[in-house]
């Protein structure tokens, strides 16, 4: 968790000043005014709530942890626990901390989502895009009773639709329904997921989770971007993929099918079918990427050095790797492994920081550059 907060903080610290951004794109012309008159005041209203919520959650976590240690020590002194002491200690700490501070951390989590929605929603609006966190709505959860009332909705948002019959138990907080879920979450919010999966460009998984959906249109080309995390499932579940998926519907259709990926981890893959290996124009790119296509000429045109630089710039900015993609029919679909993006800064830092807004704007600008680089000059004329 500490490493993740450090990554988020670093990306915010590296953000350009708003005054500098204002000169870089037409969409950014009024960013300083929007920050001063709209975004900063609204974040300022939330700052006192943020400080109180974080402080309360941390304080209760420390107190409950100490309480759990005292209880475990007393048990050990009275009855002894032998080899079971440390597992018992871990269990008691987890139970006591969750019971005492769980609702407070839920409040912090909810504030984080609201902050992302405000900052990224404002940034997307400048481009005419829309933003959804895809997180469950926790605004109506204030205590354990209201949490139980939302349990079915929250479970299906996080882990997918219910499987089989559910069992209901009566508790002091109300009825609790327990059921199994398929681990798939809701349906993919973008065609990118199934396209990349069918092309064998995503690993096998047992559980998946989507967040941070951005949708819009750029010079007549519709697009969607979403973050996804895939986990292996089971007792020792591990994250097998975490990154962003981008799907762009171009106004002009590709004649063939081209599949490309960073060299080293992907050779050809079962999704390549009857495709043939492509020799790119640049030797540097040939060494860095493996490409297969059923239209050699088109593939080299699609992945020309200037266009590949747009893809690499996106990869570089997000500190990502294993860039891969499919170009077919009227779409470009790419995936990039990267840590959490579009976070709008840490909830443990002051909210009124213009770099939160600047970072979001820069990331959206890179996305626009990527789309622009693959559109033809004739099509974009008069549209940008």
Image (cartoon, rainbow, N blue to C red):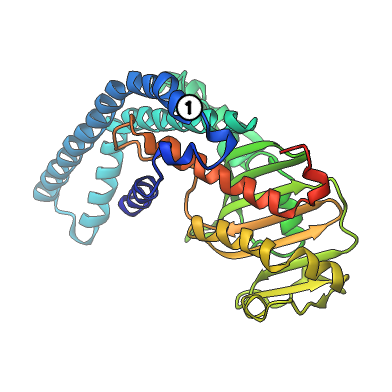
Residue 171 % position (x, y): 42, 22
Q: Is residue 327 left or right of residue 100?
A: right
x 29%, y 47%: residue: 91
Q: Nearer the viewer, residue 4 or 308?
A: 308
x 37%, y 50%: residue: 14
Q: Quadrant of residue 329?
A: bottom right
Q: Nearer the viewer, residue 222 or 281?
A: 281
x 48%, y 27%: residue: 118
Q: How many marks do you count on the picture? A: 1
Residue 46 % position (x, y): 34, 21
Q: Is residue 297 left or right of residue 138?
A: right
For the C terminus, the quadrant is top right
Q: Residues within 10 Å of mark 1 (few under 14, many from 20)?
A: some
Q: Is residue 203 left or right of residue 319?
A: right
Whether residue 343 is visible: no
User: What SS does tag 1 mark?
Assistant: helix
Q: Nearer the viewer, residue 265 or 345?
A: 345
Residue 44 % position (x, y): 33, 22
Q: Quadrant of residue 164?
A: top right
Q: Quadrant of residue 154?
A: top right
Residue 214 % position (x, y): 62, 38
x 61%, y 38%: residue: 213
Whether residue 315 is visible: yes
* Residue 374 sits above or below residue 216 on the image: below
* Residue 250 sits above or below residue 237 on the image: above
* Residue 7 sits above or below residue 360 on the image: below
Residue under pointer 1: 118
The residue lying furthest to the left in this view is 77
């Amino acid at each position: 968790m500490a490493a993740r907060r450090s990554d988020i903080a670093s990306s915010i610290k590296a953000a350009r000043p708003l005054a500098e951004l204002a000169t870089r794109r037409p969409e950014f012309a009024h960013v300083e005014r929007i920050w001063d008159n709209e975004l900063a005041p609204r974040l300022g209203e939330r700052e006192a709530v943020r400080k109180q919520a974080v402080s309360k959650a941390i304080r209760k976590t420390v107190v409950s942890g100490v309480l759990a240690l005292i209880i475990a020590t007393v048990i050990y002194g009275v009855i002894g626990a032998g080899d079971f002491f440390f597992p018992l200690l871990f269990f008691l700490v987890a139970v006591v901390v969750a019971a005492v501070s769980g609702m407070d951390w839920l409040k912090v989590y909810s504030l984080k989502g609201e902050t992302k929605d405000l900052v990224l929603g404002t940034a997307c609006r400048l481009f005419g895009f829309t933003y959804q966190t895809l997180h469950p709505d926790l605004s109506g959860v204030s205590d354990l009773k209201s949490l139980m009332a939302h349990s079915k909705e929250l479970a299906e948002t996080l882990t997918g639709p219910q499987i089989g019959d559910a069992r209901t138990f009566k508790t002091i907080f109300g009825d609790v329904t327990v059921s199994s879920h398929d681990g798939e979450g809701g349906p993919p919010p973008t065609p990118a997921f199934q396209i990349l999966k069918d092309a064998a460009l995503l690993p096998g998984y047992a559980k998946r989770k989507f967040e941070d959906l951005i949708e819009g249109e750029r010079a007549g080309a519709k697009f969607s971007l979403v973050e996804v995390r895939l986990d292996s499932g089971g007792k020792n579940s591990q994250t097998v993929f975490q990154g962003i998926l981008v799907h762009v519907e171009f106004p002009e259709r590709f004649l063939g099918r081209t599949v490309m990926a960073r060299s080293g981890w992907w050779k050809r893959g079962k999704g390549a079918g009857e495709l043939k290996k492509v020799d790119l124009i640049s030797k540097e790119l040939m060494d860095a990427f493996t490409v297969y296509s059923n239209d050699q000429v088109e593939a080299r045109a699609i992945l020309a050095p200037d266009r590949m630089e747009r893809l690499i710039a996106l990869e570089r900015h997000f500190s990502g790797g294993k860039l891969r993609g499919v170009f077919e029919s009227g779409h470009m679909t790419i995936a990039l492994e990267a840590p959490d993006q579009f976070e709008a800064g840490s909830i443990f830092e002051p909210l009124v920081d213009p770099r939160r807004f600047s970072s979001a704007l820069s990331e959206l600008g890179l996305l626009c550059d990527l789309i622009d680089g693959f559109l033809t000059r004739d099509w974009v004329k008069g549209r940008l």
